Structures are given as C-alpha cells and as structure tokens.
Image (cartoon, rainbow, N blue to C red):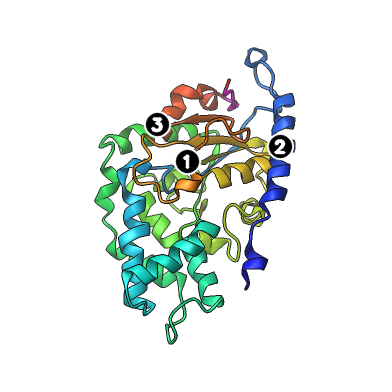
Amino acid sequence: MSNEDETIDTAAVGASVVTSTESNSKRSGSSSGGASDNNIVKTIIFDVDDTLYDVASGFTIHRQGEVIYQYMVDHLQFKSIEEAKIIRDKYFKLYHSTGKALTVAQSEDELPVGAPTFDIQHMAQYWVDHLNYNILWGCDSTYASTTKKNYDKLKKSIKIVAFSNGPRSYVVKVLKTLQLWDLFGSNEDADDGKYVFGVDDVLPYCKPEKESFEKIFDTTGKTIRPEECIMVEDSMKNIRAAKALGMKTILITGSSEDGRDLSGDAPSTNDPAVDIAFQTIEEMKTKLPGLWQNPSIFEPY
C-alpha cells in the first residue's frame, strides 16, 4: 500500500461538494410548505469522537496523545515518545484514523526495524484497557440522561447509525460509557449494536473516502439513500465528503477548541458544505425540532 494509492482526491471531492451544495440549495425551499421528498430524513449517521461527546472534555487529546504514543513505544518498539509522535502525527494528518495511519506507516517501512506487525485490534484493546473514560464526563455530568432521552424518541422513526474512524471495540466502549449503545441497535429496544461501525469495518478505506461511506450504505442493507440521510460530524473533511455524496450535514463545533487533535481540520461554520452548525448534539432537539416529527423533517433554516 502506498501513499499515492491511499491519498484522498480532495480536488475531486471539492468539485463534487460545490455541485452537491448548489443542488441542495435549489432543492431547499421554505419550511412553511411542510414535508417534501427533499427534506424528509430516514437515517442519521453520527461520528463518535468529538461529536457524541464534547471535544473540550480533553478525551480525544488524551487518547491520541500520551496513550497512543506510549502504546507505540511499548508495542511497536519506538525508542521514545518523541519518535512515536513524529510518525503517528505524519500519517494521522493524512487519514484522520490512527488505525489506518499505523497500517500505512507499516506498509511504507516507517515502523522501527524488527517491530511486530501492527494489529489494529491489539491497539483497540490497549485503548479499551488504558484510557481514562472518566474524562468523557468532564464537560457535562447530565449528558446521559438528557441526550439519551431525546434520542430514544428519535429512534422510533429514524435509523440511527454510528460511524467512527476509531476501531470498533474502542467505539463500543465509548458508546457504552456514554450510555448511548442501544441507540444504535436494530430496533427500538435492541442492544445488538447492529448499526455501529468502526474503521476496521471499512478498511482499507476510512472517512472521508467515499468508499467508506458506501460500505456503510451497503452493510445496512442498501436502505440508506444519501439524500435522506444526515451526517453529524466535527471534521470538515468528513462534512465535505458527506455533502459530496448528497447527504445533509450537521457540524458539531464543540464548546471550545481546547483538546482538538487536528487544528487544521477545525470547524468552519461558513463552509458551503455545512447545512447547520451547533456546539453539541444536545442542541439538536431545539435547533432541528422537525426531526422529531413524523415523518422526520430536516429544516435548518
């Protein structure tokens, strides 16, 4: 696997975004006319990290900083935290997924000589075992009760999907810690996690590559039509990719920029690929009340 093979064609995505955004603008009419085929929503896809919890909690920088660097020293034979940081950060800037970043780094002989084969499941288990999940509660101790109550109601009429660039076992741990796991089951009461996807479910792709989104559409039984789907994200690259595929978009900005791992991908609320932006997902009920109607309606204006 080479960088050339894996590099995302951002120019092509950008062109598609402009076309899709213009088309979306033409479709969007006044909300006073009620439901139309253009604003009905049947699926919401949530990113997990810095979306289902606030980036300002510091959990992401904890995971993608001290913990992953120590993993690379302990298990991939890097001589120091500093050396590990150089390699991880280099590839993470390209792929926004540590699992894919280290997979590609290994294929390009960037891991230390004699290092064991990188195993994304091994890394995921390290995160499950070594991260301080109490940090997730750092910003809002009422998160579980308020958010879960709202989204339990939403799930009655909308398919709710979780799609992360983190490995699945880690994503499961986060969702269960946040008490949101059963939102992503196969029906109102299921806790089977049928609609939870990690990067290991879509490799060799990852967000924002369009093939990763297409795998999600296919795996859910081809019942997701992009134009009837909302992507909820904190990453501008992923927002633009979703819009290029014809999806509606919600940008989660976070309550502050403290703790953001990639400052170059910071939220840009004026970007044409963004349909609506707010700080945390708790605001969705008040900013987009139409989603709780039957049928669910996306009315961001």
Kindly indicate whether the residue at mark 3 contacts the one at mark 1 (C-beta within 8 angstroms): no
Could you tell me which residue is drawn at 36 percent across and 67 percent down?
A: 125
Kindly indicate whether the residue at mark 3 contacts the one at mark 2 (C-beta within 8 angstroms): no
Q: Is residue 236 left or right of residue 21?
A: left
Position of the C terminus by quadrant:
top right
Placement of 110 over or under 171, stated as above or below: below
Of the pair 98 and 203, the residue shown nearer to us: 98
Q: Nearer the viewer, mark 1 or mark 3?
A: 3
Residue 285 found in image quarter:
top left
Position of the N terminus by quadrant:
bottom right
x and y, in percent, of residue 206 in the image: 57, 58
Label annotation for residue 282: 3
Placement of 1 over or under 270, stated as above or below: below
- Where does label 2 land, which residue? 18
Magenta-highlighted residues: 294-300
Residue found at the very far top of the displayed protein: 32
Label annotation for residue 188: 1
**Residue type indicated by callout 2:** Val
| Disc on the earlier residue, 2 or 1 | 2
